[in-house]
Amino acid sequence: MPLLASLSTRFASQRPFEGLGIAACLHVTAETATFVRLLRAGGAAVSLAASNPLSTQDDVAAALAVRHGIAVCARAGVDRDGYYAHIARALEPAPDLVVDDGGDMVNILHTHYPALLPAVTGGCESTTTGVVRLRRMAAEGALAFPVIAANDTPAKRMVDNTCGTGQSAIDGILRATNTLLAGKTVVVAGFGASGRGVAERARGFGAQVIVTEVDPVRALDASLRGFRVLPMAQAAPLGEVFVTASGSCDVIAAEHIAVMRDGAILANAGHFDVEIDVRALAALAAGIRRDVRPHTDAYDLPDGRAVLLLAEGRVVNLVAAEGHPPEVMDLAFGIEALALAWLAGNSGKLAAGVHEVPDQIDAEAARLVLGTVGTSIDVPTPAQQAYLESWRQGS
Ligand code: ADE
C-alpha cells in the first residue's frame, strides 16, 4: 500500500492527530491494519471495532493488539450483542474523531452514548450505506458533528465501489462455491457503483448478466451498457447466481425464492444482511445443511430443490474472501486519512452535517497513487488553463 506508506512518512513528521483519540469501526482486515497504524503514526490513540460480525480477520486483530498495541475489540463470528458491545468498547476512550464503515458507530454514539458527543469534533464515513444513513440523520437535525463522506469522491467510487466490489464479490462467490461463471445467468440486484462493478466483472467471466433496479436512470444506464434489465419477479426463475448490491431490504424475498432454479446461489454484496430475506428462506426450507462448503449453507426446499446461501447473507466479499485487494484500499484509506487530517486541522470550523471531501484531496490521492505506479500525466499549458477558466472564448 504505497500511498499509505508515503503518508506514513508525512504524518510521522507532521503529526496531524497529536493528542487526539480516534475510534474506528471498520472491517478488521490486513488493509485496515495498515490504515490504523498510519493514524497512529500521525499521533492518534486508536481504538478499533469491527463493522460486521463476520468480517474480522482474527489473525490481523490479534497482531494489531499484541504486536502493535492497538485497542482492538473484534472477533469473527460474534453474535449481534457481542458486535454492538465491541463498538461500545471502542468508544470508551471518548474519541475526538470517529471513522465509520456503515454508520453503526455514529448511530450508537448518538443513541446510547450522547454524553460523549460534545467531545467529538468530526468523523469520516467509508461506505454508501453509511452516507445514506448519515444524510437521513442530518435531515432530521440528529447528527451532532461534521462527517466527511469519504465514500462519495469520484476516485473512491471508481476504484473501491466499482473495481473493488466488482472483483472481491466475485472472488467471494468463487471461493465459496468453486462454480463456473461462463455461460451462467447471473442476476445483479442494484446498478449503483458497486452493482455495476459486479455486473461488469460477471460479464467479463462470460456470464449472461441480468440487472434489476428500482431507479429508472440506473436501469437505463444498465440497459445502454448492454445488460438485460428485468424486474426481480421475472429474473428469479432465470438466474443461477444472484448478487444483491442495492442497499435496500428484501430485494430477494419469499416469492422470488419460490420460483428459483434448483441449485441457485444467493450472495449479498451490500453492506447489511437485509437484502436477501434470510428469515423467509429459512421459513420456506424443510432443512438446512450448514457449511456444505466453507461459507455455503444449503437450504433444502420441500419440493426437492436446494438454494445455496453464501456468508449467511452478509457481505460476501469480506466473509468468503478478503475484501478489496490492498491496491484498492490504498486509495480508499489514503483519501480517508487525508480527509481526517484535514478535519483535525479544521476542528470547530465545520457545521454539524455531512460534508464532501474537498476536491483537492481526491486529486492529491489519485496523483500520489499514479506516482506510486510510475504513471505521469499531462499538465495544462498556461493557454489551456486560461481557456478552461474563461467563458469568453467560443469557436
Ligand atoms: N471494505 C472492502 N474491502 C475491505 C478491506 N480489504 N479492508 C477494509 N475494508 C474493506
Image (spheres, grey):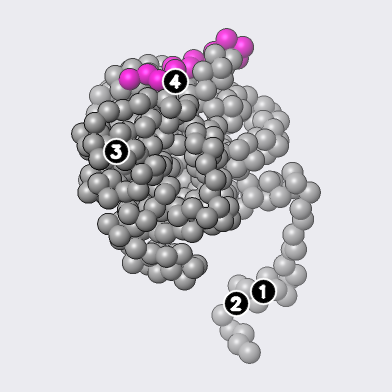
For marks 4 and 3, give the one nearer the viewer.
3
- As measured in the structure, the alpha-carbon distance from the residue carrying label 1 to the one carrying label 3 is 70 Å
- Real-space CA distance between mark 1 and mark 4, rounded to the nearest whole angstrom: 55 Å
Mark toward the viewer: 2 or 3: 3
Nearer to me, 19 or 58: 58
Residue under label 1, please give it. Answer: 386
In the displayed structure image, the side of residue 140 where residue 387 appears, left or right: right
In the picture, the disc for residue 76 is: 4
Contact between labelled residues 4 and 2, with CB atoms less than 8 Å apart: no
Task: Name the residue carrying label 3.
Answer: 304
Q: Is residue 1 left or right of residue 171?
A: right
In the rendered image, residue 76, in percent from the top left (x then y), is placed at 44, 20
Q: What's drawn in magenta, residue-wise?
A: 65-79
Q: Could you tell me which secondary element the residue under label 4 belongs to?
A: loop
Proximity of marks 1 and 4: CB atoms separated by less than 8 Å:
no
Mark nearer the viewer, 2 or 4: 4
Q: Earlier in the sequence, mark 2 or mark 3?
A: 3
Query: Does residue 171 sit above or below 380 in this rendering?
Result: above
Distance from label 2 to label 4 (Cα)?
A: 56 Å
Residue, x 39% and y 42% (percent of image)? Answer: 263
Earlier along the polypeptide chain: callout 4 or callout 3? Answer: 4
Residue shown at 61% from the left, 12% from the top: 67
Q: Are marks 2 and 1 in contact (CB under 8 Å)?
A: yes
| Residue lying at 47% horizontally and 46% vertically, measured from the top left | 151
Kind of residue sitting beneath label 3: Gly
- How far apart marks 2 and 1 lie (CA) works out to 6 Å
- Across and down, in percent, residue 27 comes to 48, 29
Q: Amino acid at mark 4?
A: Ala
Of 139 and 43, nearer the camera is 139
* Location of residue 54 by image quarter: top left
Mark in front: 1 vs 3: 3
Where does the C terminus fall, quadrant-wise? bottom right
